[in-house]
Image (cartoon, rainbow, N blue to C red):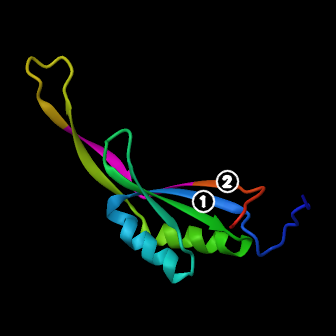
């Protein structure tokens, strides 16, 4: 098998972006506007159990900054309130507790090898 040569036109990074459902359409459109076509997978968050989407992006070196900018501009964090019962209360009275949700969580992974067929 021949050694694979790396060029600047090959995919060198893999972004895995976990995005809240409210931001996914804007994020997908922003990425398409800069000619980056992600693969979209439905997912569910672990803490709140809310719907998310996970985008897989194989990026060339010149696309990394464009992808980060597109996601920063299209995804935002919000404050939502979660009802948490008060401890040491005689009755379980839920108290609204503010939590930050939304935005994008991006994992940036180096790619050593990939194949297309």
Say what secondary structure mark 2 lies in: strand
Quadrant in the rendering for residue 46? top left
Q: Which of 67 and 114 is in front in this view?
A: 114
Q: Quadrant of the C terminus?
A: bottom right
- The x and y percentages for residue 57 are 58, 64
- Mark 1 residue crowding within 10 angstroms, few (<14) / some (14–19) / many (20+): many
Q: Which residue is drawn at 36% across and 51% down?
A: 101
Q: In which quarter of the image is the N terminus?
A: bottom right
> What range is drawn magenta here?
96-106
- The x and y percentages for residue 52 are 37, 54
Q: Nearer the viewer, residue 7 or 2?
A: 2
Task: Say above or below: 17 vs 117.
Answer: above
In this picture, residue 101 sits left or right of residue 82? right
Say what secondary structure mark 1 lies in: strand
Q: Nearer the viewer, residue 83 or 31?
A: 31
C-alpha separation, residue under disc 2 versus residue under disc 1: 6 Å
Q: Residue furthest left?
A: 91
Give whichever of discs 2 and 1 has the lower sequence position.
1
Residue with the mark numbered 2: 109
- The x and y percentages for residue 24 are 39, 65
* Majority SS type along the magenta span: strand
Q: Which residue is drawn at 30% across and 53% down?
A: 79
Residue with the mark numbered 1: 15
Task: Say above or below: 60 vs 52.
Answer: below
Q: Residue furthest right?
A: 2
In this picture, residue 116 sits left or right of residue 102? right
In this picture, residue 98 sits left or right of residue 88? right
Q: Which residue is drawn at 84% across and 72% down?
A: 7
- The x and y percentages for residue 2 are 91, 61
Whether pointer 2 and pointer 1 mark residues with C-beta atoms closer than 8 Å, the reply is yes
């Amino acid at each position: 098998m021949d050694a694979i040569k790396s060029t600047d036109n090959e995919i060198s990074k893999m972004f895995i972006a976990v995005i809240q459902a409210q931001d996914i359409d804007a994020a997908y459109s922003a990425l398409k506007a800069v000619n980056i076509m992600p693969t979209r997978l439905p997912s569910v968050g672990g803490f709140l159990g809310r719907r998310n989407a996970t985008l897989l992006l194989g990026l060339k070196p010149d696309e990394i900054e464009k992808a980060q900018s597109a996601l920063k501009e299209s995804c935002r964090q919000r404050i939502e309130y979660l009802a948490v019962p008060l401890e040491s209360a005689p009755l379980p009275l839920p108290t609204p507790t503010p939590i930050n949700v939304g935005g994008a969580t991006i994992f940036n992974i180096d790619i050593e090898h990939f194949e297309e067929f």
